[in-house]
Image (cartoon, helix red, strand yellow):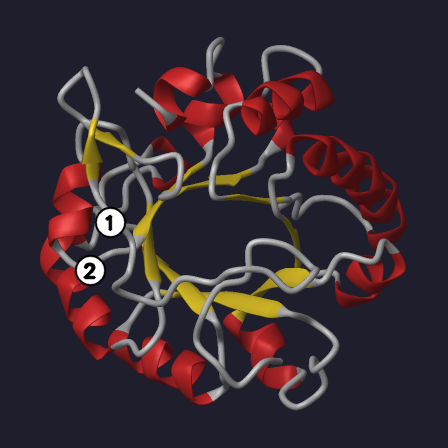
Amino acid sequence: MPADHNIPNSCPASAKSGKNQQTIHIGQTGYVTHSGRVICVTQRNLCRRPFLEQLRAIAKARPLKIILREKDMNERDYLDLLIQCRDICQNYKVPLFAHTFIQAARAAQICSIHLPLPVLEANAGLLSDFQAVGTSVHSLDEARRAAALGANYMTAGHIFNTQCKAGLPGRGLDFLSLICKESPVPVFAIGGITPENMPDILKAGAAGGCMMSSLMTAENPESLISP
């Protein structure tokens, strides 16, 4: 894994931006225009239309990146889907991150991956062939462990109440602010992120936010990614 703390935009060498070098722009709706701040996290079973059709619409809207997170799949089936998603994302020049399945990512020549923290810990020192490695954290201790392992970025959550975590209250903006202050790498909020609360997570120090359910079900994903 690279020693620097920037998030590459694609596998080839490209311009990179550091933790605090992104510019906030205000769109016509009054919300932050954040195509460079929204990460799409997938869950294909939520889609109301064929998943690849939905993914194509999302990629067309140009989020910061797409993380193919399909936890119910075995690695062989995941690889097949990863290759199809890779081709769509390449067409729209949107970075695609694999999730969990390290060997599938290598087989599909995906150079960026998001790993649960225990998987990252189990593979410490074995990921130098990836250009970017991210992880998920749910506490300050986990954020410190992720940073020590050399994660290029981390997602922190869940921040707001969300149907995906029904019955579990969000950890809130104070939690997010604490993680952002402690982290030497970009932090992206996850859990109940919307265009309306995007300014709040940015003020808390986040580099952006992750959206899953809303993007998987949106008829017009661009309305969420570039409102």
- Please name the amino acid that badge 1 sits on: Ile
Which residue is at the front of the view, 124 or 161? Answer: 124
Q: Is the residue 203 above or below the residue 32 in the image?
A: below
Q: Residue at x 72, y 23 (%)?
A: 52
Residue 179 sits in quarter: bottom left
Q: Position of residue 120 (x, y in %)?
A: 59, 77
Question: Which label was assigned to residue 98?
Answer: none
Residue drawn at the location 27% of the way across and 46% of the way down: 168
Mark 1 closeness class: few <14, some 14–19, many ≥20 residues within 10 Å: many
Q: Which residue is mark 1?
A: 159
Q: Position of residue 127 (x, y in %)?
A: 69, 80
Q: Secondary structure at mark 1?
A: loop
* Amino acid type at image mark 2: Leu
Please indicate whether residue 65 sits to the left or right of residue 225 in the image. Answer: right
> Disc 1 or 2, which lies upstream in sequence?
1
Q: Is residue 156 above or below residue 87?
A: below
Which one is in front, 136 or 220?
220
The residue at the point 22 percent across, 42 percent down is 160
Which residue position holds label 2? 176
* Horizontal side, residue 149 vs residue 168: left or right: right
